[in-house]
Amino acid sequence: MPAKKYIAWAAAAFVTFYVVKQPDGAAQSLNDAASGLASAAGSLVTFVNALA
């Protein structure tokens, strides 16, 4: 169980370091992730509508 906690803290530290050192890259990564989620949601809506 403690290993999960250390991994979570390490991941949070890495994300914080990335955001501080490369804010433009972090913003682009977040934009890409949001765009991917929006695309996946649109595909899911199309699939559900095709079932109806």
Image (cartoon, helix red, strand yellow):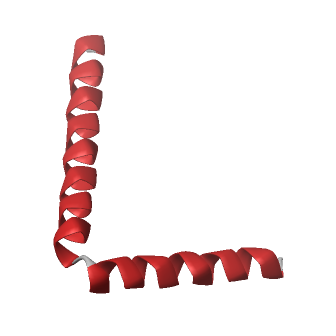
Q: Find residue 49 and report its image quarter.
A: top left
Residue name at image x 23 percent, y 54 percent: 34
Which residue is rendered at x = 22% and y = 51% of the image? 32
Which residue is the extreme one toward the right?
Answer: 1
Q: How many numbered discs?
A: 0
Residue closest to the eye, 17 or 3: 17
Residue 16: x %, y % from top left = 39, 84
| 50, 26: nearer the viewer | 26
Looking at the rendered image, the quarter that the C terminus falls into is: top left
Residue closest to the eye, 5 or 14: 14
Instruction: Give how far across and how far down residue 13 sits, in percent.
Output: 50, 84
In the displayed orientation, state which residue is furthest to the front.
21
Asked which quadrant contains residue 40, the reply is top left
Q: Is residue 10 left or right of residue 51?
A: right
Instruction: Decide: is 50 above or below 32.
Output: above
**Vertical arrangement, residue 46 with respect to residue 33, above or below:** above
* Quadrant into which the N terminus falls: bottom right
Residue in the picture at 21% in, 77% down: 23
In the rendered view, tell whether residue 29 sits above or below residue 36: below
Asked whether, in this view, residue 5 is left or right of residue 35, the answer is: right
Residue shown at 18% from the left, 61% from the top: 28
Q: Position of residue 42 (x, y in %)?
A: 20, 33
Is 40 in front, or is 27? 27
Expressed as whole percent of the image width and height from the top left, the position of residue 9 reads 60, 84
